[in-house]
Image (spheres, grey):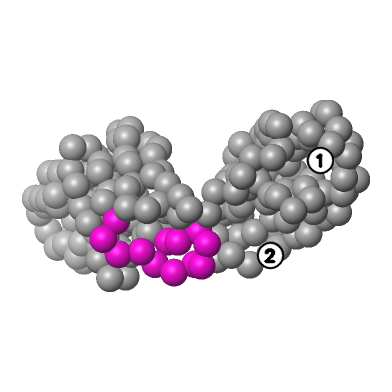
Amino acid sequence: MAGGKLLHVHGKQIYYITDPYFQEIKDSLSLESDTSLQVQFKRLRANAKYVVWSGTDGKRIKDATIELNDTMVISNTLGLATFKALKVDTLYPYQVIKEGMMAESGTLSLKKDSTINIYLMATGLEYPRDIASMEIYPTPASGYLVVNVVLPSDGNLLITVVDQTGRERKVIKREGFAGENQFKLDLTDLASGISVLIIQHGDRSYRQKFLLQ
């Protein structure tokens, strides 16, 4: 249950509460004196506000297309796009598209009015994959992140975690060897949100985005 209206009643009253975002309530009561009544009611609908950001420079992105539930909204100059009166506890698939950037997709389920931050990476910033293969888990990460990486040759690795604004939050140096390598990164000192893991090997690098809870 969520929300409520405070009613002041005297004598026998029939009260009726209606709101497009909440379940209607109709009831009656009989009182001998003025009384304050707290009425709880169930939320049926909520608003979703999308904020579209650049994952490289932390700036908001306008003219991104957000598709949700067969509805399309274009982000404004502040990177905002709002979907109103969505049913709560309903799974909505969405996709965010912007020319020259990697598309993002996912699902949304609301309990209340919510803000959803979306971070897009420019397609031109994808680094060459000199690293033979790379896997990170768990995703979403919580407290730690395990990195499995297969390298084509021996060499030092520079592992960097960057937040959604592009700021370096953690820098780790490791010695890498040709073949399979595994590292467990302690992320307990980092704030939750979208982050990017960057591994540099020699003069090349590779990045992968992940969610930290």
Snapshot quadrant of residue 37: bottom left
- At 78% from the left edge and 59% from the top edge, which residue is drawn? 171
**Amino acid beneath label 2:** Glu
Q: Residue 148, percent across and down?
A: 76, 33
- At 79% from the left edge and 35% from the top edge, which residue is drawn? 151
Q: Residue 61, percent across and down?
A: 36, 64
Where disc 2 sits, the SS reads strand
Q: How many marks?
A: 2
Say whether disc 1 or disc 2 marks the residue closer to the N-terminus.
2
Magenta span of residues:
53-64
Specify few, some or many for label 2: CA neighbours under 10 Å numbering under 14, 14-19, or 20 or more.
few
Specify few, some or many for label 1: CA neighbours under 10 Å numbering under 14, 14-19, or 20 or more.
few
**Label disc, if present, on residue 168 of the rendered structure:** 2
Q: From where the camera sits, is residue 36 visible? A: no
> Can you name the residue that lies furthest to the top here?
179
Where disc 1 sits, the SS reads strand
Q: Which residue is mark 1?
A: 184
**Label disc, if present, on residue 122 of the rendered structure:** none
